[in-house]
Amino acid sequence: MTSRIIVVGAVAYDPKVVTIWEGIKQFFVDHQCDMDFVLFSNYEAQVKALLSNKIDIAWNTNLAYVSCDSQLGGKAKLIAMRDTDLGFTTVIIAKKDAQLTTLGDLRGQTVAFGSKDSAQAAVIPEYFLIEAGLQADKDYTALRFNSDVGKHGDTGTSEREVVHAVLSGEAAAGALGKSAWDHLQTTGSAAELMAIWTSPPYSHCCFTALPQFDSELTAHFVETLMKMDYNNPAHKVILDMEGLTRWVHGEKDGYDTVFKAARKVGYVAPNKVCAAESH
């Protein structure tokens, strides 16, 4: 096997990202896999770095993966994911007394969305509204909170703004990712709210590599990653911070809806085809 350092890119959406990746790097070193990481301020810069071979692997959001894959003609390597990246969903919330129960009920209403590059809080919900026959700013008013553009919604700021807009009455409904909705429910902040619609499941983040990236190095990276054990207290700290209990192998099927949505709302060119659609 070729022996060299595997360089991984990640986006610094929060100070904890440094702690997470320092911990992952140390884990890899302890398991005889030379790895280092580079932090980016936004996913567009990270995608550009991957496509220009400045990093080997990118820890991407689903939209960053779709962007890479579309530019690579459907040949990007999707090598690993979190267990929590499978079966992700978007919900549209409203106040319990709003008398809204379906997407069709949003006609003529104001709907709040998170950052324009957030799959869960903008791209996916707008796509399904289009599929339901509702066009933004024609059939309903879109209230957009582009507070963390470049981070693809990772900071959660725009979703908190969506919740505030619904609670204050500025919007009749709003779009959130499943994790944000689950958090609201566990903290009791959702007492006045209900989910009026839940999307079909789709996949979230993944490790992405170029198609020509060395297969032995890829296998070594994935095999090492899979050794992280949630039952090991030292590993658990890192895994909890990154929001998973175990790493899993990449599955492209879950990105089919994300790609269709990204194409429909104009996030990627409409003639691009991703691997999930080509097999």
Image (cartoon, helix red, strand yellow):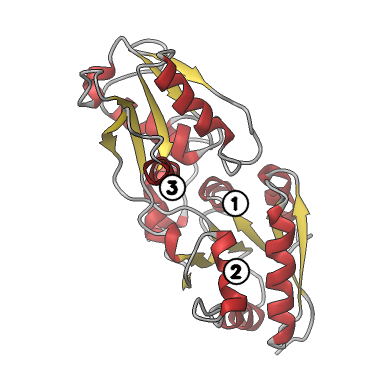
Categorize mark 3 by other alpha carbons within 10 Å: few (<14), some (14-19), many (20+): some
Q: Please provide percent x and percent y for residue 88.
A: 38, 51
**Badge 1 element:** helix
Nearer the observer, 56 or 38: 38
- What residue did someone put label 3 on? 179
| Mark 3 or 2, nearer chain start | 3
Q: Please provide percent x and percent y for residue 255.
A: 42, 52
Judged left or right of residue 67, residue 89 is left
Name the residue rendered at 41%, 56% in the picture: 276
Name the residue rendered at 36%, 42% in the picture: 185
- Alpha-carbon distance for marks 3 and 2? 19 Å
Indicate the quadrant where residue 228 lies.
bottom right
Nearer the observer, 114 or 218: 114
- Between circles 1 and 3, the one closer to the viewer is 3
Q: Please provide percent x and percent y for residue 132.
A: 25, 26
- What residue did someone put label 1 on? 68
Categorize mark 1 by other alpha carbons within 10 Å: few (<14), some (14-19), many (20+): many
Q: Report whether residue 76 is seen.
A: no
Q: Which mark is residue 264?
A: none
Judged left or right of residue 229, residue 253 is left
- In the image, residue 222 above or below residue 194: below
Q: Are marks 1 and 3 in contact (CB under 8 Å)?
A: no
- In the image, residue 152 above or below residue 36: above
Q: In which quarter of the image is the C terminus?
A: bottom left
Q: Quadrant of the N terminus?
A: bottom right
**Badge 3 element:** helix
- What residue did someone put label 2 on? 237
- Alpha-carbon distance for marks 2 and 1? 30 Å
Q: Report whether residue 121 is seen.
A: yes
Q: Which amino acid does label 2 sit on?
A: Val
- Alpha-carbon distance for marks 1 and 3? 25 Å
Q: Please provide percent x and percent y for residue 95.
A: 31, 23
